[in-house]
């Protein structure tokens, strides 16, 4: 690569997003599947320099300093194992993932909100067991009524998900861009079809 690439690479902010590194735990599994555990190339190179990770795969592009030339890592593995969290954080994103990005009343995909099954106006709590993904039309139709008053039914009862369940669900929804060097590490622990 010539010097023009280096200056173009550092001047173009979108170029910083073009070379993310997949981050694997010491057991060679991604730290998370959804969102996929990715670092910007700068963080990956810094971790390599600090000897916190090993490079497993690289891009063809390089970055240079006056004394060093290094290929940009595309897959790195942590040298120390990070214990996965057992408890799944109650966030909007995780709620949508648990419900597989579908309205739990009609099954529609797309513009989702969340709905309290037992409305807050009637003492319903904001918890895994009482909140579901809902499309806007269903959410408006239900309003602050109970399911029976609105004549609506849930596709599945809401419950707190386990972390392993969320990792498995995350595999169903890969991000828009998957670099070919990542594929072997994303699905190597998936169950094989007989």
Image (tube, rainbow, N blue to C red):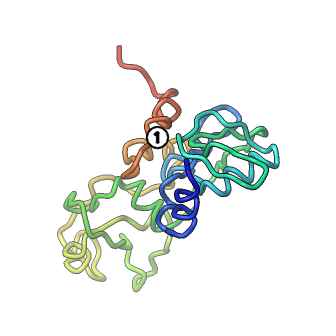
Q: Quadrant of residue 90?
A: bottom right
- 170 versus 8 height, above or below: above
Q: Nearer the viewer, residue 121 or 75?
A: 75
Q: Residues within 10 Å of mark 1 (few under 14, many from 20)?
A: few
Q: Residue furthest bottom?
A: 121
- x, y (%) of residue 80? 79, 40
Residue 150 position (above or below residue 98): below
In the foreground, 111 or 90: 111
Residue closest to the far top? 194
Location of the C terminus by quadrant is top left
Q: Which residue is disc 1 drawn over?
A: 168
Q: Residue at x 45, y 64 (%)?
A: 93
User: Residue at point 27% right, 70% down?
Assistant: 111
Name the residue: 17% across, 69% down. Answer: 151
Tell me the element at label 1. Answer: helix
Q: Nearer the viewer, residue 159 or 69?
A: 69
Q: Position of residue 64 (x, y in %)?
A: 68, 52
Residue 99 or 71: which is nearer the viewer?
Answer: 71
**Left or right of 72 on screen, residue 135:** left
Does residue 138 appear left or right of residue 79 in this picture?
A: left
Percent of width and height locating residue 129: 46, 62
The residue shown at (43%, 36%) is: 180
Q: Position of residue 88 (x, y in %)?
A: 58, 55
């Amino acid at each position: 690569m010539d010097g023009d690439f280096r200056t173009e690479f550092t001047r173009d902010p979108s170029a910083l997003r073009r070379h993310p590194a997949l981050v694997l735990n010491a057991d060679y599994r991604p730290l998370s599947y959804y969102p996929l555990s990715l670092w910007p190339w700068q963080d990956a190179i810094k971790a390599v320099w600090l000897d916190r990770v090993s490079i497993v795969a690289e891009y063809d592009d390089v970055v240079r300093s006056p004394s060093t030339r290094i290929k940009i890592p595309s897959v790195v593995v942590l040298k120390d194992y990070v214990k996965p969290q057992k408890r799944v954080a109650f966030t909007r994103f995780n709620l949508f993932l648990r419900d597989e990005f579908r309205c739990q009343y009609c099954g529609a995909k797309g513009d989702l909100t969340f709905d309290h099954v037992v409305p807050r106006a009637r003492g319903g709590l904001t918890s895994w067991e009482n909140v579901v993904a809902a499309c806007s039309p269903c959410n408006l139709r239900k309003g602050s009524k109970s399911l029976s008053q609105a004549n609506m039914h849930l596709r599945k009862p809401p419950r707190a998900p386990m972390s392993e369940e969320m990792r498995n669900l995350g595999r169903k929804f890969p991000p828009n861009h998957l670099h070919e060097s990542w594929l072997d590490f994303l699905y190597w622990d998936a169950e094989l079809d007989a």
